[in-house]
Image: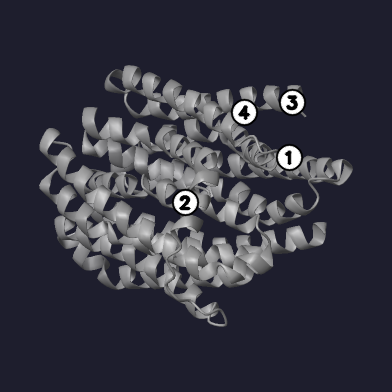
């Protein structure tokens, strides 16, 4: 069992390593070509679009997989159609909110608004990607999912390498091109995964009662994901409103490296989750799985944290515009072990059917994060954002741990 977990995790990590290298190269190329100001504009657009990802996700995959493999394949056509509907719906919402923000705040320039309209297509692509990933996860065929992600990101990076001179010569046009490549990466991954799942008949099937059932069951977990992404991303939104695009770019550049490290617990827990589901009624095995998860993730956090701390000065060496990113990355890295340890705790709430309590936990943490970012970002800027990110996650871990001990 543990071998299968580590094998699935390794398959994802190998694929993620390739994807991370592609994303790393893309980030460096974009940062160097666009500079901190236009990289800040690019960051605003990406952060705004990805704010809608949790609404599309909403924990539906987790609920869907709990039904068992046979029911997953039987109901996949309805699930796939449901995901497409959500993608289109939220892409329209994203464009509408982007237009409103552009009217109210100069931080959302005409360039940002026009590119948001373009980038909304990525939301639909992400919906397709999630649908097929649910199928692969239920079968525990993570290698197939990884292939799709790897090919999509590699294609996007390859095209960026070809177009790099154009981005550097015309950074305004470069922002638009960069967003097009972002969309290409998402849709490329989605289409490759669809091809790999070709032995499943993918048709459109509208089943309103089933859709409502999934939605109703997913509400606590989905709301939790929304709270989570808001407190993850609201700092960049406040920076966009109160600080310069250059500071947004410096923070966004540091945060990209921090995000690369955060994929480890996500992929590890994706592999562990099916095993936890199978053994949730076996207390000894369940506790053993959780214990191994905590130990592995803590050690991994220490290793990646030390590596990022040591490598942080390279951000300033890369380009003078991003010298402030050094301290920002190190401030973010201080919270890395906390983020790693929170990941299995969240799934404990799900498996114990305590999604409502989890939603309250993240809702309170989101309010804490929004209030403190609102108070401190206008004066202290990106450093305050980085520190508040770690403190908020510590609050989540502490309160979640206390609750789990009092309600075993």
Asked where in the image residue 248 lies, by quadrant, the reply is top left
Q: Secondary structure at mark 1?
A: helix
Q: Outermost residue, bottom direction?
A: 199
Which sits in the foreground, 403 or 250? 403
Please name which of the two marks, 3 or 4, marks the residue nearer to the observer. 3
Image vertical order of residue 332 relative to residue 50, above or below:
above
Q: Earlier in the sequence, mark 2 or mark 1?
A: 2
Q: Are marks 2 and 3 in contact (CB under 8 Å)?
A: no
Q: Position of residue 362 (x, y in %)?
A: 52, 30
Residue tagged by mark 1?
A: 294
Image vertical order of residue 77 relative to residue 35, above or below:
below
Residue tagged by mark 3?
A: 407
Residue tagged by mark 4?
A: 397
Asked where in the image residue 152 lies, by quadrant, the reply is bottom left
Q: Is residue 154 visible?
A: no
Q: CA distance from mark 2 to mark 1?
A: 35 Å
Which residue is at 17% across, 37% downward? Answer: 107
Q: Outermost residue, right direction?
A: 284
């Amino acid at each position: 069992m543990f071998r299968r977990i580590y094998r699935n995790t390794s398959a994802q990590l190998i694929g993620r390593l390739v994807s991370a290298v592609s994303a790393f190269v893309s980030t460096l190329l974009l940062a160097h070509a666009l500079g901190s100001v236009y990289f800040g504009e690019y960051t605003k657009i990406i952060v705004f679009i990805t704010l809608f990802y949790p609404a599309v996700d909403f924990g539906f995959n987790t609920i869907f997989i709990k039904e068992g493999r046979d029911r997953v394949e039987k109901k996949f056509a309805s699930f796939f159609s449901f995901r497409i509907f959500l993608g289109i719906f939220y892409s329209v919402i994203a464009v509408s909110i982007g237009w409103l923000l552009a009217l109210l705040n100069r931080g959302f320039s005409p360039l940002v608004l026009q590119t948001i309209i373009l980038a909304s297509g990525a939301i639909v692509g992400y919906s397709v990607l999630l649908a097929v990933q649910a199928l692969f996860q239920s079968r525990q065929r993570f290698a197939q999912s990884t292939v799709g992600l790897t090919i999509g990101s590699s294609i996007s990076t390859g095209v960026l390498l070809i177009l790099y001179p154009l981005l550097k010569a015309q950074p305004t046009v470069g922002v638009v091109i960069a967003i097009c490549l972002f969309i290409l990466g998402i849709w490329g991954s989605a289409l490759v995964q669809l091809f790999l799942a070709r032995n499943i008949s993918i048709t459109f099937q509208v089943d309103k009662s089933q859709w409502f059932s999934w939605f109703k069951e997913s509400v606590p977990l989905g709301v939790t994901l929304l709270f989570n992404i808001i407190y993850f991303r609201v700092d960049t939104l406040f920076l966009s409103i109160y600080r310069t695009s250059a500071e947004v770019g410096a923070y966004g550049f540091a945060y990209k490296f921090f995000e690369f490290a955060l994929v480890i617990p996500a992929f590890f827990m994706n592999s562990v989750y099916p095993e936890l589901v199978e053994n949730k009624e076996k207390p000894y095995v369940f506790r053993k799985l959780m214990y191994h998860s905590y130990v592995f993730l803590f050690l991994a956090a220490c290793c990646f944290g030390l590596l990022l701390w040591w490598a942080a000065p390279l951000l300033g060496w890369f380009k003078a515009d991003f010298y402030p990113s050094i301290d920002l990355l190190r401030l973010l890295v201080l919270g890395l072990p906390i983020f790693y340890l929170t990941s299995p705790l969240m799934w404990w709430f799900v498996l114990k059917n305590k999604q409502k309590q989890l939603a309250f936990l993240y809702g309170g943490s989101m309010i804490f994060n929004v209030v403190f970012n609102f108070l401190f970002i206008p004066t202290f800027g990106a450093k305050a954002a980085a520190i508040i990110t770690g403190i908020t996650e510590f609050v989540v871990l502490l309160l979640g741990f206390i609750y789990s001990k009092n309600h075993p």
